[in-house]
Amino acid sequence: MERRSFRSPLARAIGLGSARKGSQHWWAARVTAVALVPLTLWFAASIVAHAGSDYTAVIAWLRTSLTTGCMILLLIMLFHHTALGLQVMIEDYVHSTMKYAAVIAVQLGCYGVAAVGIIAALRIAFGG
């Protein structure tokens, strides 16, 4: 049985075609956006609930395992979603040789800030 290809003969000849990353990127952005809804609502409600609390009460709250886990999930989802969105913006609007350097810089920045936040949450959780 003959396999049909919808690519042009030129594209087949030079091996160009879909990188097959577009749908994965799209799904990752949607999944992180959906995950951010309850996490952001939880975080906002928690901040409002602890608005008048003193330092020791907030630290005690942050040391609970559920809070630490939710905080780490929030940081991961938030900065991964940010990196995905900024990457798309750079790819769409930057038309120079600096495009790839900008994407790498944004990703390093986002994941670096997430790592610092996760380390801070773990240090608070374990009393460091």
Image: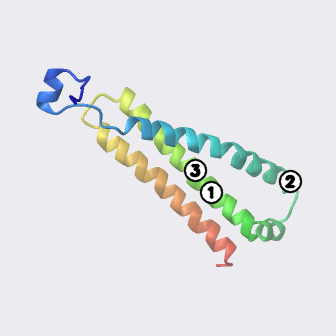
Q: Position of residue 94 (x, y in %)?
A: 34, 30
The residue tagged 1 is 73
Dot in front, 2 or 1? 1
The residue tagged 3 is 77
Quadrant where the C terminus sits is bottom right
Question: Can residue 7 be seen in the rendering of this structure?
Answer: yes
Q: Are marks 2 and 1 in contact (CB under 8 Å)?
A: no
Q: Are marks 3 and 1 in contact (CB under 8 Å)?
A: yes
| Disc nearer the start of the sequence (2/1) | 2
| Disc nearer the start of the sequence (2/3) | 2
Is residue 79 placed above or below 71 in the rendered structure? above
Q: Secondary structure at mark 3?
A: helix
Question: Label 3 vs label 1: CA separation?
Answer: 6 Å
The residue lying at 14 percent from left, 22 percent from top is 10
The residue lying at 24 percent from left, 35 percent from top is 97
Q: Secondary structure at mark 1?
A: helix
Is residue 124 placed above or below 73 in the rendered structure? below
In front of the other: 62 or 41: 41
Question: Label 2 vs label 3: CA separation?
Answer: 23 Å
- Residue type for callout 1: Leu
Q: Position of residue 72 (x, y in %)?
A: 62, 60
Relative side of 64 to 112, left or right: right
Rendering quarter of residue 30 = top right
Q: Residues within 10 Å of mark 1 (few under 14, many from 20)?
A: some
- Residue type for callout 2: Ala
Q: Position of residue 116 (x, y in %)?
A: 54, 62
Quadrant where the N terminus sits is top left
- Residue type for callout 3: Met
The residue tagged 2 is 49
Question: Can residue 86 be seen in the rendering of this structure?
Answer: no
